[in-house]
Every structure is written in structure tokens, then in C-alpha cells.
Amino acid sequence: AKDEKVFTADEVSQHNSLESLWVSYKGKVYDVTEFAQSHPGGAKNLLLAAGKDLAPFWGLYQQHSADHVQEILARYYIGKL
Ligand code: HEM
């Protein structure tokens, strides 16, 4: 869409706590603050990636490439990087 929001990596990096937890992945930005408490891998693990790109973490925990995981992430989309 034309009026999609665009965020800088610096802006994303400021949302790095349980109060406001953003991540980026493949050029898209997600606000997963609400999801943190229900993450099957725990809020603490999710916090490791807070304000950052998911790729290195999901490279280590490859269960995230499953379709249902991608669908969950998509619900929290807020804009582009
Ligand atoms: C498991 C989502 C980030 C570590 C899962 C599962 C989902 C999920 C849906 C369950 C998968 C299944 O069993 O089929 C997400 C989302 C993330 C995220 C949406 C980012 C927004 C991370 C990060 C880490 C991580 C950054 C590690 C630093 C794990 C681990 C499990 C897991 C260890 C396995 C838990 C278990 O089965 O006991 N995640 N995850 N996740 N996640 Fe994540």
C-alpha cells in the first residue's frame, strides 16, 4: 500500500523491552509486544531479539521457518524497514 509506514533500523532498535518489543525480518517491521507473553520459547528468548533483526536467531532455532510461525509473525506487521 502507498501509505505504508517506513521505519529506520535505529527507530526499531529503540523498541527493545517488554514494554515495547519490535523486531525486523526480511525488510519488514513487527510489533510483537503482545505476543511476548505467549511465545512458546519464552519472553526472555524473544527479548534477545528485541529491537533487532530475527534472521540470526531464527537461523539457530529453525522451527520458526514453519508456515504457522510465519503466519503468527504476519499478524504483528506494522511497516517496512
Ligand atoms: C518456539 C514464534 C522469536 C526461540 C516458537 C514457536 C513459535 C515461535 C510459534 C512454536 C513453534 C512450534 O513448536 O511449532 C516466534 C516469533 C518470534 C520468535 C513470532 C519473533 C517475533 C524467537 C527468538 C528466539 C526464539 C528470537 C531465540 C532467541 C524459540 C525456542 C522455541 C521457540 C527455543 C522452542 C520452544 C519449545 O518448543 O520448547 N517460537 N519466536 N524464538 N522459539 Fe520462537
Image (cartoon, rainbow, N blue to C red):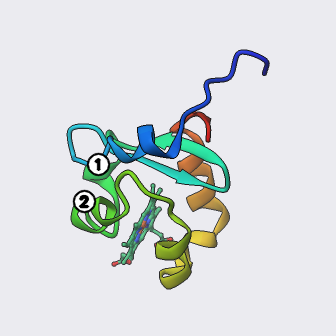
Quarter of the image with the C terminus in it: top right
Sequence-wise, the earlier of marks 2 and 1 is 1
Question: Is disc 1 surrounded by few (<14), some (14 to 19) or many (20+) residues within 10 Å?
Answer: some
Q: Amino acid at mark 2?
A: Ala
Residue toward you, 9 or 63: 9
Residue 77: percent from left, percent from top = 57, 37
Does residue 19 appear left or right of residue 74 in this picture?
A: left
Question: What residue do we see at 50% from left, 63% from top?
Answer: 54
C-alpha distance separating marks 2 and 1: 12 Å
Does residue 57 appear left or right of residue 67 in this picture?
A: left
Question: Residue under circle 1?
Answer: 16
Does residue 66 appear left or right of residue 50 in this picture?
A: right
Question: Residue under circle 2?
Answer: 43
Question: What residue do we see at 34% from left, 55% from top?
Answer: 50
Q: Is residue 73 above or below residue 42?
A: above
Secondary structure, mark 2, is helix
Q: Quadrant of ligand 1?
A: bottom left
